[in-house]
Image (cartoon, helix red, strand yellow):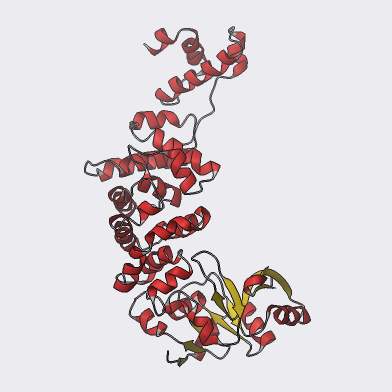
Amino acid sequence: MVLKILKLPELTKSFPAEVKTLFQVFNSEIRLVGGCVRDLLLKKKIADFDFATKLLPDQIIKILEKNHLKAIPTGIKFGTITAVVNHKNFEITTLRKDNETDGRHCEPEFIDDYELDATRRDFTMNALYLDEAGNIYDYFDGILDLNNQEIKFIDDANKRIKEDYLRILRFFRFSCKYAKKLDREGLAACVLQKENLKKLSRERIRSEFLKIVGNENKENLLKILQVLKDQKISAEIFSARLEIKALARLFEIEKKLKFSADLKLKLAVLFLNENFDLKVFAQEICATNLEKKYLQLVNFYSASSLNELKTLLAFEEKNLVLDLYLSALARNNQSLKIDEAKKNIEFFQNFSLPNFPLNGDDLMQLGFKGSAVGDAIKKAKVFWARNGFLLKREDLIKFVIDPEISSG
């Protein structure tokens, strides 16, 4: 390892006021680290500014409190204190090395060596440190890899993965976002240790996989997903196979019709197929109750006709019905009819559900009782929807009295 220092004082102009405040409070005792430094160099929007320091957690807390700043011991075992400045959170973590790692847990040891702290991190471009003067400390040629659009593990890839098996998925996520192609050594290590993904919690897998699927670089994403499928890495964490062609078609529809599919629709298109087992997949992806309902509906109505989906507007939100249509469109192997699809999408987007003109009191006056009231309302809504939502109360009363005559 040869430390390289790049002087870029102009980067300090991009610091938010809160970051400048923390640098003033700690003087030269803290440095920005990781993703925020990487993204400052790439001139990308930064979600979180994280700091590293030689100071121990109790020293960090004392300095913050002395300067009337709130300190929260969010991860004190691992040396992390959250500083609250202007109601914004910033993590400050003591330099450490991770001992007795088993791919899931570790025993942290606090140190005062930035170089040693850098060795515990995953990728070279995530091991960059930036001080208050704009000096970047680069221990593993992270800036070179960043400029070359390469995601490389620090030193030995197999060793880095054994420290935390989630790094297998992180390798693909960061490669999808920042790399031109997959690093051969990194890929080989991920394939070699893919079975260890089963040792991770489902919550950690969910979080990382959703970040992969949500990547904005769709061309890279499809390539990454194909590798995960071909190398049977995805098969280690999901029983359902990846339907990459369907997702590619969804992206094609997005581009041509100028709309954005949300993450849950992408997941549905990527996983739903004729052998899909919702109960199993819901456990594997740690689906919320809302996600379970959504996936169940998409799966159930996957083969529905356009008229059936329009009828469903009487019972479900139009955005959900639009997703059902898009999902079916994405899984359709026929050539895409752009004008027709655009017309249908605009119909769902602009649809406004009229007030249903019939109610329970109307039915009870006709002699309906108990559950028969709800059943009749449901059938009347279907009849109403199939007639363009245009029927009046009188028409629906005739229908519930004699469905065969009315529908005929």
Considering depth in this image, is 385 or 354 the residue closer to the camera?
385
Relative height, residue 292 to residue 11 (above, below): above
- Residue 25 shown left or right of residue 37 in the figure: right
Res 174 → quadrant: bottom left
Residue at 56% across, 87% down: 113
| Residue ranking furthest to the left | 335
- Residue 80 shown left or right of residue 210 in the figure: right
Considering depth in this image, is 332 or 384 the residue closer to the camera?
332
The quarter in which the N terminus is drawn is: bottom left
Considering depth in this image, is 41 or 31 the residue closer to the camera?
31
| Residue ranking furthest to the front | 100
x and y percent of residue 173 in the render? 40, 64
Residue at 53% across, 42% down: 290
x and y percent of residue 99 in the render? 55, 75
The quarter in which the C terminus is drawn is: top left
Give the total number of marks visible in the rendering: 0
Res 171 → quadrant: bottom left
Res 233 → quadrant: bottom left
Relative height, residue 361 to residue 325 (above, below): above
x and y percent of residue 34 in the render? 50, 77
Considering depth in this image, is 200 or 342 the residue closer to the camera?
200
Q: Is residue 218 visible?
A: yes
Residue at 27% across, 50% down: 245
Relative height, residue 104 to residue 1 (above, below): above
Residue at 36% across, 80% down: 145
- Residue 382 shown left or right of residue 240 in the figure: right
x and y percent of residue 303 in the render? 33, 33
Q: Is residue 87 visible?
A: no
